[in-house]
Image (spheres, grey):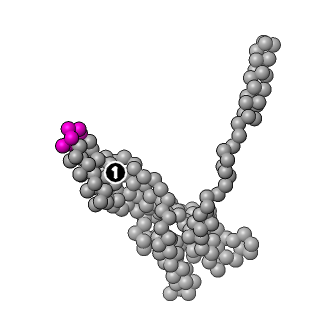
């Protein structure tokens, strides 16, 4: 039993020394270069502390943009929505078709058409919270992501959408909806 405890103690000491030799990668905690620019696209501050009005406005805007509400947690200020859309690309299909034809002429079989994008689900996640300074204003942050499936029903892409136009369209609609709700129009 005494030797067993010695082995456990030596094993623990060895693990501590070995893990102390491991270093974090350079730039591990460094934010990406475009981080602030991306946050400015994703966030807006509204001069109201009525989170209920903002949450109902967010839900209305997402529905106007053809999203289906998947989940909302009003106490946490979270709204999640999604919509299914076509992801096919004529150029991608044309290239895949000619690659398949050239492969067949060359005597090999390939299925490039199966790798073409087919459908996608676009997800919107919105977080609503009061500002930290005075609590009289509300911060709204939205992110849009998409998951793309190819013709073979395999996931081919998972990415965050960074197109400023999508975010601008959402926030324009939200500003109008908040104004209409506040003025009971």
Image quadrant occupied by the N terminus: top right
Please provide percent x and percent y for residue 164: 50, 70
Tell me where the magenta segment starts and ends, as one range.
104-109
- Nearest the camera: 73 or 19? 19
Please provide percent x and percent y for residue 46: 62, 77
| Badge 1 density bin: few <14, some 14–19, many ≥20, Cα 10 Å | some
- Nearest the camera: 85 or 62? 85
Q: Is residue 42 left or right of residue 17?
A: left
Q: Secondary structure at mark 1?
A: strand
Q: Is residue 146 visible?
A: yes
Quadrant of res 120 = bottom left
Q: Is residue 141 visible?
A: no
- Nearest the camera: 6 or 182? 6
Overall secondary structure of the magenta section = loop
Residue behind mark 1: 150
Residue located 47% across and 70% down the image: 166
Residue located 50% across and 74% down the image: 168
Residue 57, above or below 110: below
Residue located 75% across and 25% down the image: 14
Please provide percent x and percent y for residue 110: 26, 42
Residue located 28% across and 60% down the image: 90
Q: Is residue 137 left or right of residue 146?
A: right
Q: Is residue 2 magenta?
A: no
Residue 161, above or below 174: above
Q: Is residue 169 left or right of residue 118?
A: right
Residue 92, above or below 11: below
Quadrant of res 136 = bottom right
């Amino acid at each position: 039993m005494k030797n067993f405890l010695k082995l456990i103690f030596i094993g623990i000491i060895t693990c501590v020394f070995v893990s102390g030799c491991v270093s974090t990668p350079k730039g591990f905690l460094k934010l990406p270069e475009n981080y602030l620019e991306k946050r400015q696209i994703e966030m807006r501050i509204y001069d109201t502390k009525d989170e209920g009005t903002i949450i109902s406005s967010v839900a209305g805007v997402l529905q106007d943009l053809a999203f289906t509400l998947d989940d909302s947690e009003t106490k946490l200020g979270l709204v999640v929505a999604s919509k299914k859309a076509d992801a096919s690309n004529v150029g991608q299909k044309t290239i895949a078709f000619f690659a398949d034809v050239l492969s067949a002429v060359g005597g090999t079989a390939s299925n490039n058409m199966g790798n073409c994008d087919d459908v996608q689900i676009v997800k919107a996640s919105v977080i609503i919270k009061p500002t930290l300074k005075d609590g009289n204003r509300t911060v709204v942050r939205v992110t849009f992501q998409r998951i793309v499936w190819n013709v073979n029903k395999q996931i081919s892409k998972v990415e965050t959408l960074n197109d400023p136009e999508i975010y601008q369209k959402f926030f324009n609609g939200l500003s109008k909806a908040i104004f209409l709700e506040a003025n009971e129009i």
